[in-house]
Amino acid sequence: MSTDHKGAYVEYAPLNEPKPFGENVWIVDGPEIRMDLGPLKVSFPTRMTVVRLADGGLWLHSPIAPDERLFAAIEKLGEVRWLVAPNSIHYWFMADWNARYPEAQTLAVPDLDVKAKRPFRIDAKLEDGMRFAWSDEIDWLLVPGTSFSEAVFFVKSARLLVLVDLIENFEPQRVRNPLQRWAIQLFRANGSLPYDARLTFRPKMREVRQQVAKMLAWPIERVTMTHGKPITEDVPATLKRAFRWAS
């Protein structure tokens, strides 16, 4: 995996800078990453979510490639106490954040201890049903798959659903590469889980349906995800369409 500050997408500027996304919530758009998909290298924009908890500590979801400017900006918001790797794809930079914040508790989905190609410290696994010090403020559940599972989170005070890949919401007009723009529309990566990624959930569809139903029962008013435009309008109907594959 590599990062690239100029490439396939019109970026969500400014990069590596916390942007308010509700009370005590920030999103940070990062540089593109290039991932190997078979013989191809495909570019993806990145995003992390930061929540300031009631005790003043920071909860960081899917941390992006850091630099000193980003570390300094995060530290102005509070003390980093939680680092979250929400699936077995979005973990690559956890080791960098571990090193910067060794006192922070690091949480990861259950399979990452064996799947991670770049090892990092894991203090606890996100096993479905577990409670943490922040559980009164953030609900969560695990959507199980085969090649990857995803932990999804609901920030109660902000009525915010925080996802990684269960929705990819690329805006075709921001995609510079015409071939990649065509692929995004073909695989439905503009407002749902892409067709190819759905295959990982098919063997566990009964559990997936149950978990998605619980998730959609949360009083969600906004959604942010790692790839693409956050959802802030017509949210219930948009989520219903996005998860039709799991209904």
Image: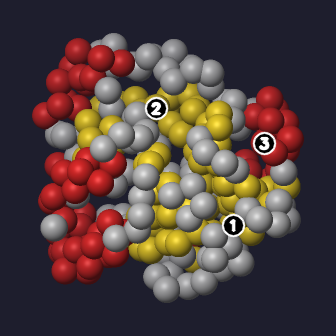
Reading the image, the residue beneath label 2 is 45
Residue at 23% over, 51% down: 237
Residue 160 relative to residue 173: left or right: right
Reading the image, the residue beneath label 1 is 106
Which element is circle 3 on?
helix
Which element is circle 2 on?
strand
Reading the image, the residue beneath label 3 is 74
Q: Position of residue 90 (x, y in %)?
A: 50, 52
Instruction: For marks 1 and 3, give the CA distance.
Output: 17 Å
Instruction: For marks 2 and 1, give the CA distance.
Output: 23 Å
The residue under label 2 is which amino acid type?
Pro
Residue at 56% over, 65% down: 156
Instruction: For marks 2 and 3, give the CA distance.
Output: 20 Å
| Residue 71 figure quarter | top right
Which element is circle 1 on?
strand
The quarter of the picture where the C terminus appears is bottom left
